[in-house]
Structures are given as structure tokens and as C-alpha cells.
Amino acid sequence: MARFLVETFGGKSLLVILASILLLAAGLLGTAPAQTSKDDRTKAVREVAQYFIQTGIKQYERGYYIQAEKSFFRALDYEKYLTAATLKNLNELMEGTQCCGRKRTHLGAYSKGRRTN
């Protein structure tokens, strides 16, 4: 069969056809891993953001409101990778830390002033 193709198309034409097929196959195979790599990167970035959110929640539960707020801001750095539901939850958590942090700071200032009087 190869002899038939060489006689019909000539030797150089056959090489061009084979090279074209190989380049096409290589191009198709090269795009699949790139998409997988992008999906893996997105997944990894979401996991990092979730780590900061979980850390912030633990800090909030322990009363470390300022540190929790910082952790939530770190998670917010990855907002373009987060789902709408996760962003909504993160914003609610941040509102809670801002409120509690201000109350705690205000009470701390009051008690410090009270001790000096």
C-alpha cells in the first residue's frame, strides 16, 4: 500500500501528508493536558482559599477577630476562583469579624481608661 501511495503522490507529497498528520495529532494531544493543568491549578487555588476561610472560622470561634479578618482577606485575594456561594459566605463572615473586632477594641479601650482613673 505504501508503494501505491508513493507512486500516486510522489515521495515528497507523502512526507508532507504524514508530517501534517503528525502535527495535527501532536496539536490535539497537546491541548488536552493544558486544559487539565488549568483545571488542576483552579482546584488548587480554591483549596488555598478554603484553607484561609477555615482558618479564619477557627480564629473567629476562639475570639481572635482581627486575625480571623486577616485570614478572610487572604481568602478574598482569590475571589475570581471562588464560587458565588463561597463569596457570599466569605462576605458574611467578614462582616461578623469587623463587627466583633470593633466591639472588642472599643471595650478594651474603655477598660484600659477605666483602670487608669
Image (spheres, helix red, strand yellow):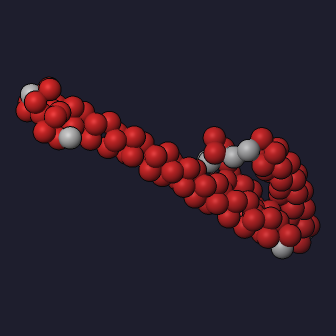
Side of 30 where 23 appears, left or right: left
For the residue pair 53 and 81, the one nearer the viewer reads as 81
- Taking the image as shown, residue 1 lies to the left or right of residue 79, namely left
Q: In the rendered view, tell whether residue 44 sits above or below residue 62.
A: above
- State which quarter of the image contains the C terminus: bottom right
Image quarter hosting the N terminus:
top left
Number of numbered callouts drawn: 0
Q: Residue at x 73, y 44 (%)?
A: 83
Q: Residue farthest to the left?
A: 11
Please report the residue visible at 61 percent of the width from the left and 55 percent of the height from the top: 43
What x and y, as percent, mark residue 116? Answer: 86, 70
**In terms of image quadrants, where is residue 40?**
bottom right
Q: Is residue 67 above or below residue 30?
A: below
Q: Residue at x 46, y 46 (%)?
A: 32
Is residue 32 visible to the viewer in this orientation of the structure?
A: yes
Quarter of the rendering containing residue 62: bottom right
Residue 80 picture location, percent across and down: 63, 41
Report x, y in % for residue 26.
32, 43
Residue at (10% x, 30% y) in the render: 7
User: Could you tell me if residue 64 is visible in this image?
Assistant: no
Vertical placement of residue 8 versus 56, above or below: above
For the residue pair 116 and 67, the one nearer the viewer reads as: 67
- Could you tell me residue 66's position as x and y percent? 75, 60
